[in-house]
Amino acid sequence: MLAYASIAIIGIGAAVAIPSEILKPVAQVSGLLAFTLVDLFTIAVPLAAAFLVVAFASKLVIRKQDFTFYALPLAPLVL
């Protein structure tokens, strides 16, 4: 479920158009920083939110969790 949601979130995040006027002050300092901030707010934050929804929903369903229960779904997002 998280993998399918991740594909949709990444697709929508990649399609978001950010005006150059917003990025111009940051891009003057570092172009890589500007692109990183855009990816952070359009892709990484929504992916983290989707992971939290899945984690809380599965916490209600499965009563006994351990570290690997959360680490395995989170690993692709971190990589």
Image (cartoon, rainbow, N blue to C red):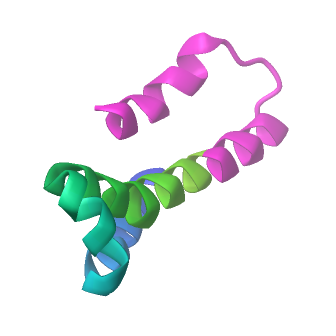
Q: Name the residue located 54 percent from the left edge and 48 percent from the top edge.
A: 48
Closer-to-camera residue (68/23): 23
For residue 29, above or below residue 41: above
Residue 3: x and y in percent read: 39, 53
State whether residue 76 appears in this view. yes
In the image, 50: left or right of 16?
right
Residue 4 occupies quadrant: bottom left
Residue at (38% x, 28% y) in the render: 75
Does 36 appear above or below 19?
A: above
Residue 14's x, y, as percent? 26, 73
Q: Which residue is the extreme one toward the left? A: 31
Would you say the magenta stretch is mainly helix, strand or loop? Answer: helix
Pick the front one: 50 or 29: 29
Give the magenta part as a residue range. Answer: 52-79
Q: Is residue 63 magenta?
A: yes
Image location of residue 44, percent across then percent down: 42, 52
Relative placement, left or right, of 42 versus 33 is: right
